[in-house]
Amino acid sequence: MRNPIFPKPNQQASENIVNVAKAIEVAIAPSVLDSHSNDSLTNAAREFGETDEVKVEPINEIQFPVDLDELHPVSGSAIGDLMDKGFDAIAFYKSFRHINCHPAPGYWGIFYIKPRVALLINEMMSDTGLAKDECLDSILRFLYGHEIYHYKIDAICLQKEAFSNYLIYRPYRNYVNSLSIADWYEESLANHYGLAALESFNSHRGFDAYEANQVVKQFMNELVQMSPGAYRLGLDRNVISLFGPRGLLAKQIVQGCPTTNAISQASLKLLESTFFQQLLLEGYKNFKGDRFLAAELSLTFCPVNWITWYKNGSAVYASKTVPLKEIKEGFIKNYLGGEQKRLTDHEYFKIDNGELVKVPNGHDKDIRLYELKNIIEKAGMQNTEFWAARNLTNKWKKSVPREVIKSAR
């Protein structure tokens, strides 16, 4: 089956980008490759700690669609993860400059974290009632639009480095990593173009025509709204303006460059202006726009991969979980006004809408997925509402019990 989401991969072109980048960087700073720091990565890949194996599966026509049935998440929440860390907790971009770094030495590009995508699909199915395939399709499209923007910035910087004779991307990433998540403006634009990937567009240079339905768009908009710091600015209509995240991003890209005799403040100001003008060429909601890139750096040459960490033969989720004690004492008793009605092998509580809720026994420290799903549905809530309320109430400690009582779903 042909892959309907991503352009056809071109391994030779992807390898050429790696070689060109290496030649440019070494010509500017011969010692740059001696550094083994992976400053292009978010913390997502570091969360998995010590594992036995990292499996990378490049996505192409043969390996799509993917079979996620091998994954059976017991607990955890991808929505909880992205509320804490943004969408880069579900997928991430690894620069061609760091192809030999961990994770996945020898690979670069976009990496979907397979276990967390599986978790997000389960939660999206529960909230929207959509079929598994449609949830998978829309999640992959959004994440592609988000992560390909990180490649765009990397590629723009490489073009400028080729003519400016000083490093731009590595200093920029080091500078941004020192900032609060509220100032990560590249993530604002990435979320903007993630949402754009769900909008109506025609076939273009390897991208099939597509438009998501309103249920998908609403769900993904809610996730962006719930995201931390600058991630949520992807919904701001000023995101592409000079005074919004796009203009602030242009400033950040050059702020990492140290001023030297060879690099004057005037030249950095000019560089900032040209960055902004090039970013403008993307247009509004045009995630596949790459008119500002040389043909050799086309978006279609950025590889797309699945990545899975394994320990003791099982996939590692390293995902957000909720303690069973918090569900009972906080969510059920405090937020839902639950009163104990029966005690057998399990406890049963009558909550504010009259529903009888069973509290799982204490065999596990964290509540299981199906158990949490049942309680959330009896409370008349969706997964997105649960995690948003958890955040707003500081884990069910303030503004409780809830003011608006909902009927069970």
Image: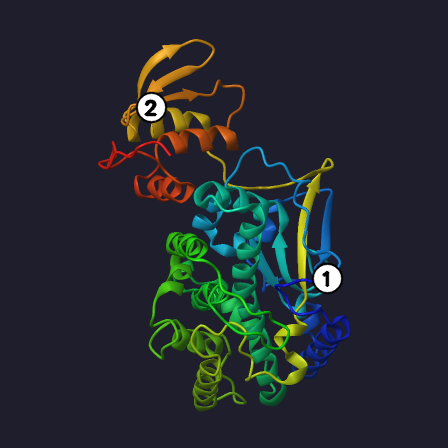
At horizontal 53% and vertical 56% (from top left) the residue drawn is 138
At horizontal 52% and vertical 89% (from top left) the residue drawn is 261
Residue 1, above or below 48: below
At horizontal 45% and vertical 79% (from top left) the residue drawn is 283
As drawn, the residue found furthest toward the top would be 344
Give the residue number, with chain letter if any, for mark 1: 61
Q: Going by the image, does 152 lie left or right of 269? A: right
Q: Where is residue 167 in the image (x, y as percent from the top left)?
A: 59, 79
* Quadrant in which residue 195 is drawn: bottom left
Is residue 180 at least partly visible in the picture? Answer: no
In the picture, the quarter occupied by the C terminus is: top left
Give the residue number, with chain letter if any, for mark 2: 355
* Quadrant in which residue 270 is drawn: bottom left
Q: Position of residue 372 (x, y in %)?
A: 46, 31
Secondary structure under tag 2 reads: loop
Q: Distance between the residues labelled 2 and 1?
A: 48 Å
As drawn, the residue found furthest toward the right would be 12
Residue type, numbered disc 1: Glu
* Quadrant in which residue 349 is drawn: top left
Q: Where is residue 277 in the image (x, y as percent from the top left)?
A: 45, 86
| Label 2: how many Cα within 10 Å (few below 14, some 14–19, many 20+) | some
Residue type, numbered disc 2: Glu
In the picture, the quarter occupied by the N terminus is: bottom right
As drawn, the residue found furthest toward the left would be 403
- The earlier-in-sequence mark between 2 and 1 is 1
Is residue 278 at least partly visible in the picture? Answer: yes
Q: Are marks 2 and 1 in contact (CB under 8 Å)?
A: no
State the residue in front, 199 or 169: 199
State the residue in front, 48 or 384: 384
